[in-house]
Image: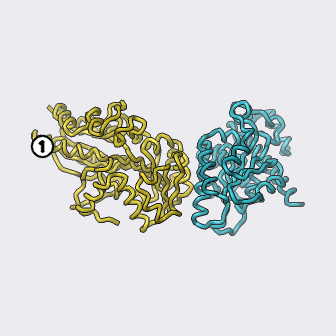
Chain colours: A cyan, B yellow
Amino acid sequence: MTEIENLVKMAQNVRRTMVSVADYCNNAIHWGSSLSCVEILLSIVSDISNISTAGIEDREKDILVVSKGHAALAYYAVLEECGLLKHPFVEEYQKNGSQYSEELTMNEELLIKCSTGSLGLGLPFAAGLAIRGKREGRDGRIYCVVGDGECDEGSLWEAVMLSAQLKLDNLALVVDRNRLQLDGDTESIISQSALPDRLAAFGWKVEKANGHDFASLRAAFSAGKETPLAVIADTVKGKGISFMENDFTWHEKVLQGKLLCTARGEVGLI
Amino acid sequence: MMEMDDRGIKFLSYMGARGTLGQAVFDMAEEKKFYAVSADLGVGSGFSRFADKYPERFVDVGIAEQNMVAVAAGLSSKETPSIATSWAAFASHRCADQIRCFLGLMSSNVKVVGMGSGLANSWTGGSHFGISELAMVRSVPGIDVIAPCDGAEIYSAVTAALLNDRPTYIWLTGGTRLPVINRSEAYRFQIGKANLIRDGKDVLIVGCGTLLGECVKAADLLDKEGISVKILNMHTIKPLDTAALLSDLSYRMIVTVEEHNVRGGLGSAVAEALSEVKDKPVQIRLGIEDFVPAAGDYHYLLECCKLTAEQIASRILMEIS
């Protein structure tokens, strides 16, 4: 099996784990935005960065900031798939007092450097990590995953400007371009179709990728590193579960009953 | 580091609030590694010498206070704090969510300094007044809130905050000339430990920030009227030194005095502590009565808010008789 084939299989496992959470959790879950970034998170954690590599020195270590805290479920499932969790999380997810909250909460053990969910905070924090990295001679790269809806937040653009100004070539931004946000189509709310041009105009190197294709993501992340890098990853919200795909009402919802059965079937849980 | 002898205390008060801030940061840089971040107010924060000598430890994010706090959080670690400065209004309300998430939720080792707190920016009008941040920051879980009263205390508060790993908000009142409140004999500063400025038996004044200068003058005026006043310098708003506050409640009244809205600041914090005690004197809360004064000179603004020494003294006289 090639590495890519293996990654594809891991992504299937991640989606299976995610759906199995619904057997234990009857609360609303951010299905759409979690499913859209499974490959992005897997690609960073398991393929492109050294995050899951054992024995890396602190100053060499890459760091991932998942600014779209809604993607917590996908993040936990990716950590588990990459062998980075000590115990299975599925039965613990969203339980009273659990560290597996619906949005990400800072936790060294879970490699969560930044509590997110209040959108637009992750990239500025990641920029701070990147500045520290450069000033202290650290070699690790800082990855930051944001949603396309999140790009509505002004605080994100403050960090975009600063990162270009300080030539943070150790910073890689990934935009999960799933084209939907809570109220509907991004293009009908705040259009992000000019996002690549905007980032380029601010002085970022911009690469486009298919956010569900590991080879495409790998190529995008390997682009030249003289400026901060932005990867606009085209994705499908709700990817992998037919009735959730491209349906904004699945931004956050309870999955149960017949639909849960259907979802289980589609990810191979039956 | 500077010695807090009489000369040092006078020198710092002559330097003013921001000059003293810059001096403290410059001197501390020799002792401990930290980052300084400003939102286009590096010069105004007195950071020029620090930035020249330690350029790799200084970041100017431009006029972007939300970014300032978030970047400061990213730069910081338990061992290496960040200090972030802007005008009080922008270092607090503008970046309220960043303070809530990074300093509150994540306990980031960040010291936010709100310069020009209170009415120090008197000529600008309300946009640059700092009269409501205490209410905001002290409601965020886990943040230390300090309001130093003179040069010595600003210097001590900044250095003490940089030496611990706690998220901290410093409410920096005062302009270019500061009152001298502290004396060198028995000078001490510890976060969370109120300082006794003068002892007395009739009235307890609890104050913070440079407005304590007016409180001292008010106590002198009351002394001439035969009213003996104790003044407690409650430089730490949170955690409040309730032990010092509640140790003796034999006064005829407790008066809180602050250059801040009477809703939510020092007076409210003291009232919260007193509310849990059964037998206690009445509390009078002096401060800004929930309005924004028009621009003018600093003394004019104090008059508008009934916070000059004479107004404080006559209010206390009226209440006590």
Q: In which quarter of the image is the C terminus of chain A?
A: top right
In the image, taking residue A247 as reference, residue B263 lies left or right, namely left
The reply to whether residue B187 is visible in this rendering is: yes
The residue that label 1 is drawn on is B223
Q: Where is residue A89 in the image (x, y as percent from the top left)?
A: 69, 51
**Residue that appears at 71% across and 48% down:** A200
Q: Nearer the viewer, residue B188 or B244?
A: B188
**Residue that appears at 33% across and 51% down:** B148
Q: Quadrant of the N terminus of chain A?
A: bottom right
Q: Position of residue B247 (x, y in %)?
A: 25, 48
Q: Which of B288 and A21 is in front in this view?
A: B288
Mark 1 element type: helix
Q: Where is residue A190 in the image (x, y as percent from the top left)?
A: 69, 34
Tally the marks. 1
Q: Nearer the viewer, residue A164 or A29?
A: A164
In the image, taking residue B15 as reference, residue A70 lies left or right, namely right
Kindly indicate the quadrant of the structure image that contains residue A182.
top right
Q: Position of residue A95 (x, y in %)?
A: 63, 44
In the image, taking residue B105 as reference, residue A117 lies left or right, namely right
